[in-house]
Amino acid sequence: MALSFSIHHIMVPVADLDRAIDFYTRLFGMGLISRKTFAERQVEIAMVGYGAPPGPPQLELVKDLRTKAPMPAPLPNHIAIDVSDLKALCAALMAEAVTFTEPFAARADGRGFSAWIRDRDGHALQLSQRG
């Protein structure tokens, strides 16, 4: 019997859970799926995403209750989000003073557009409009 796999979620450490939820729900149209505090682990976790479980992959936003800083990521990483109108999204993000690390531009492979930003906790997001 062959095994099959799918991504369930991606964990993203955050410094301010309310701010992170607002960022991903208001600016990227994700829904808040759940929010829980785990006192024994001293973390508060919110799941956001498109659809409902067991739907598409979700972001797990994790706030360490012992500190105001985000938990450090062990390796450089990024979240890739496809969008239908990247130019319009970039304009909205600029109005929100979101930090761009690479501005809106045609992709090097000629198949659409891309931009790179940082969320409010410094995580890299690759934004793409394919096709």
Image (spheres, grey):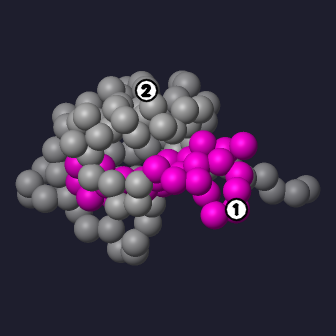
Q: Is residue 95 left or right of residue 81?
A: left
| Image quarter of the N terminus | bottom right
The answer to if 108 sits in the magenta stretch is yes
Q: Mark 1 is on which residue type?
A: Asp
Q: Which residues are magenta?
A: 104-131
| Image quarter of the C terminus | top right
In the image, residue 69 sits, relative to residue 94, either above or below, namely below
**Mark 1 lies on residue:** 109
In the image, residue 119 sits, relative to residue 51, either above or below, namely below
Question: Can residue 26 be seen from the camera position used here?
Answer: yes
Q: Is residue 78 left or right of residue 97?
A: right
The answer to if 113 sits in the magenta stretch is yes
For the residues labelled 2 and 1, say whether their Cβ atoms are less than 8 Å apart. Answer: no
Residue 127 location (% of width, % of height): 50, 48
The label on residue 29 is 2
Q: Residue 17 appears in which quarter of the rendering?
A: top left
**Residue beneath the point at 44% across and 66% down:** 77
Of mark 2 and mark 1, the one earlier in the sequence is 2
Q: Mark 2 is on which residue type?
A: Gly
Dot 1: what SS? loop
Magenta: main secondary structure: strand
Dot 2: what SS? loop
